[in-house]
Image: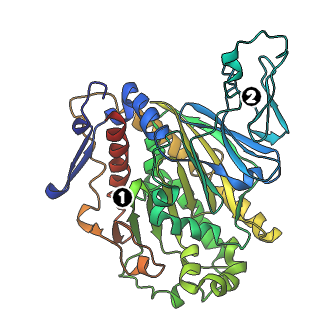
Amino acid sequence: MSAYRLSELIDDRPADGVFRINRALFSDPDVFALEQQYIFEGGWVFVGMASQALQPHDYFTGFIGRVPIIVSRSEDGALNGLINACPHKGARVAQQLSGNTRLHVCPYHSWSFDSSGANRNIKWRSGGCYGAGFDRENHDLARIPRFGEYRGFLFASLNPDVPSLEDYLGEARKLLDLVADQSTEGVELVPGAVRFTFAANWKMQLENCSDQYHFTSTHPSYIRILEARAREQKNDVVQSTLGGSDFWKEDAEGPTGGTFSFEHGHVLNWGLMAVTPALPLYERADEIAERIGTARRNWMFNMRNLTIFPNLQIAENASSQLRVIRPIAHNLTEMQTWCIAPRGESAEARRTRIRQYEDFFNPTGMATPDDTVVYEECQMGMARQERPWLQGHARGLTASVEGGNAYSEMIGLNPQRSVLGQAQTCDESLFHSYYRAWATRMQDGLA
């Protein structure tokens, strides 16, 4: 693996209470190239939402690692995962981020393909003097070897020899259910995707979504604004009995949140949140409880940051955001983000959701710019040096236990490991799941 062996990149010794990673995981271009091949192109990755292509001939484009793809809904309503490369010369046949078309026409030599990927025309074929071998070839767009949907979330793999999508998602499916079940109609992406890049490794974002330790250090201006707003609104707060009182007893000395780690690198960090009418989902609270049960309803109101390894993150805190991580280089990452929302919510709830989303997220919000600047500062410190091992993965080790706890049991969730803690516990041991999944994919690929 470049100039390294795997054991030189991840020092994983649970019996000794040691878990460390080498700076080279963030700074070595050769390691990054292998990540593209084995992490992103060698296993399941998130590629989009079914709601992005609702009507026949709707499509959107993206990437699996370095490979361009199209997700297209054909005339019969089926979703198709296709490689966005003309079989003639390899040009992308769809250059737009999304759209609706019956035919994708290659810009180079005008070969055309319908919304199912079938070849419909080869320009001047009759006069082309093709050999018999050409006629025996398949001229359709290549299909992505594995393509699947769970509750509107779309995943794909260029490697046909991967476990089923159900097995890959495992227990994390129950956390996607907490998103999808916020409406009987499922969820949708609010129009207005945002794309931006930062000059740092993709794993900075992977960790940050699950990192509670940085919040008070990295976002002090946001905290001051929240405190000022609280002072202004303290006389106008509407008290609610929903949430803690019928789920768990709030205890000032008890846990305020925790983390769950799952197979295949999926993780969740969560925290207890007060349930108030200021939350967009509040208008549906009674209906949701009646439909799916009080415990699962109340879990929807908690702060939850979910990562489906390696590239999907759903952050439900200040608002609800879906993030897709796209590594471009060892020191360059593209992020695509949306506000995600239950379909059919009222105009007032949607307006509130969007305003709260804009407040915190996006490159123009009060949090994302802080994070991306710090990623770039970290990246500069990842250069090879005499002390290669990072110390940022030890916090929470003695609090981590095998299996779940009373909070996970309330919704039938069975994690591999869990941590309960106070606001200052800020577990980092859940990052271990990322890097163990990373190591497994790399080992399997190298083998």
Q: Is residue 91 left or right of residue 384?
A: right
Residues marked 2 and 1 touching at CB (< 8 Å): no
- Residue under the point 64% across and 72% down: 181
Return the residue at label 2.
Answer: 93
Circle 2: element type: loop
In the rendered view, would you say 119 is above or below 81?
above
Q: Is residue 150 left or right of residue 207?
A: right
Q: Amino acid at mark 2?
A: Val
73 or 15, which lies in front? 73
174 or 133, which lies in front? 133
Q: Amino acid at mark 1?
A: Leu
79 or 206, which lies in front? 79
Farthest residue to the front: give it: 132
Task: Give coordinates of residue 281: x percent, y percent.
Answer: 68, 74
Q: Is residue 179 visible?
A: yes
Q: Which mark is residue 430?
A: 1
Quadrant in the rendering for residue 110: top right
Circle 1: element type: loop
- Residue under the point 24% across and 39% down: 389
